[in-house]
Image: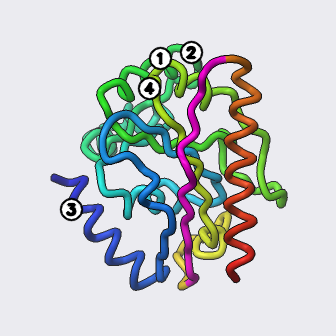
Amino acid sequence: MLYWLGKICGNIFSWIFFRLKVEGIENIPRQGAVILAANHVSWLDPPLVAFRVPRRCAFVSKTTFHKNFFTRPIVRSIGIIPLRQHNGTVGMIGIIKSLKKGIAMVIFPEGTRNYSGKSFLPASPGVAFLAEGAKAPVIPVYLKGTDKALPHQARIFRPRQVRIFYGKPMIFTGGNRQEFSDKVMSAIAELKRVADSKQ
């Protein structure tokens, strides 16, 4: 209940405040496991990726949020899955189990928010590990404008337009995980090229 209420309010807020526009939403399967792999430049990225997706999405966060008495019920109700950072393999297996239940999972192949000044950080092979383990397609996602709407260390939102581009599904059929993860980042980079051409 809290998830859907937050999604409705978030859609209204993002439409008014960020003039949120999305393209390629039809590329996301309506059911079954799917990984939404996006670039990451702002705290706004996780919720905005999910707001317009016509199905429930889950997210990954540090286990510290789940240990806090006050935040634990909130993060559980909105579908945030803990990642045990002290044991990456254990955490990834837990995410695969969640994916196999047929959910849509939002992840960030770069592993952290990108404040480097470069367009993208190198991809982690984790996205291929998840795609292989859950037999899930990967949808590359590019967010444009979130770094302006909520810059690094900013305390309040700024009224800037945000656009999100969802690419075609990518299937990991085996082989080198790093190579596949690099291809996912290349697909995100191509979405950036498309976004920049539409300025």
Q: Quadrant of the C terminus?
A: bottom right
- Which residue is labeled 4 in the image? 95
What's the amino acid at mark 2?
Thr
Residue closest to the eye, 27 or 64:
27
| Above or below: residue 196 compared with residue 160 | above
Q: CA distance from mark 4 to mark 1?
A: 5 Å
Circles 1 and 3, Cβ within 8 Å, touching? The answer is no
Q: Is residue 66 rendered to the left or right of residue 38?
A: left
* Residue 107, image x, y percentages: 53, 41
What's the amino acid at mark 3?
Leu
The numbered mark, 2 or 4, whose residue comes first in the sequence reads 2
Circles 2 and 1, Cβ within 8 Å, touching? The answer is yes
Q: Which secondary structure lies at badge 2? A: helix
The prevailing secondary structure element of the residues shown in magenta is loop
- Which residue is labeled 2 in the image? 89
The quadrant where residue 109 appears: top right
| Above or below: residue 75 compared with residue 193 | above
- Which residue is labeled 1 in the image? 93
What's the amino acid at mark 1?
Ile
Which residues, given as a range, are shown in magenta?
160-174
* Residue 55, image x, y percentages: 29, 51
Q: Residue at x 56, y 32 (%)?
A: 171
The numbered mark, 4 or 3, whose residue comes first in the sequence reads 3
Q: Is residue 80 rendered to the left or right of residue 111?
A: left
| Above or below: residue 93 compared with residue 154 | above
Residue closest to the eye, 145 or 127:
127
- Which residue is labeled 3 in the image? 5
Q: Residue at x 40, y 80 (%)?
A: 15
The numbered mark, 3 or 2, whose residue comes first in the sequence reads 3
Q: Which secondary structure lies at badge 3? A: helix
Q: CA distance from mark 1 to mark 3?
A: 30 Å
